[in-house]
């Protein structure tokens, strides 16, 4: 894995994640059922986040170290789950903080 930036270690709150989704124009309507009611994940106070394991295709039995950190939105009606790469949310947040305003 490559260099880990400080902003990747900073917690992402539910408010940060919702601001990111709005800035990116993510549609509020569930593509599976049409509901507009979602639960949104964020890093909790222990600074854990959802990780997808990475598996080496060369040695399929072995999990590689780390994996990919994700944030999720879950439909409150049908439980359809959308995953967003946490890195991009963290990067967006750090750029927004740097310019002190809106970043698309
Ligand atoms: Zn749904």
Image (tube, helix red, strand yellow):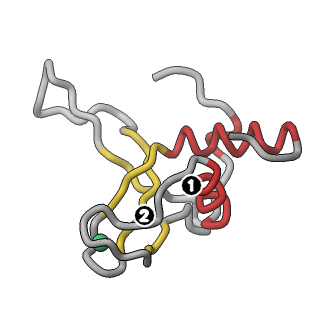
Q: For the N terminus, give its image quadrant.
A: top left
Instruction: Assess disc 1: are there few (<14), some (14-19) or many (≥20) residues with their C-alpha within 10 Å of its C-alpha.
Output: some
Residue receiving disc 1: 21
Please state the horizontal and vertical placement of residue 34, each as a whole percent of the image. Answer: 32, 72
Q: Secondary structure at mark 2?
A: strand
Instruction: Assess disc 2: are there few (<14), some (14-19) or many (≥20) residues with their C-alpha within 10 Å of its C-alpha.
Output: many
Residue receiving disc 2: 73
Question: Decide: marks 1, 2 in contact (CB < 8 A)?
Answer: yes
Report ligand 1 position as a quadrant: bottom left
Please state the horizontal and vertical placement of residue 47, each as a whole percent of the image. Answer: 58, 59
Please state the horizontal and vertical placement of residue 83, each as a whole percent of the image. Answer: 38, 52
Residue 45 sits in quarter: bottom right
Q: Is residue 86 above or below residue 80?
A: above
Q: Is residue 82 above or below residue 6?
A: below
Residue found 42% across the figure and 59% down from its top: 72
Residue found 36% across the figure and 38% down from its top: 67
């Amino acid at each position: 894995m490559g260099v880990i930036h400080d902003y990747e270690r900073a917690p992402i709150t539910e408010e940060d994640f919702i601001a990111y989704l709005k800035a990116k124009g993510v549609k509020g309507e569930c593509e599976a059922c049409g509901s507009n009611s979602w639960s949104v994940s964020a890093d909790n106070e222990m600074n854990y986040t959802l990780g997808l394991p990475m598996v080496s295709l060369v040695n399929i039995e072995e999990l590689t170290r780390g994996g990919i950190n994700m944030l999720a939105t879950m439909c409150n009606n049908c439980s359809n789950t959308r995953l967003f790469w946490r890195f991009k949310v963290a990067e967006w947040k750090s750029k927004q903080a740097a310019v002190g305003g809106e970043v698309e």
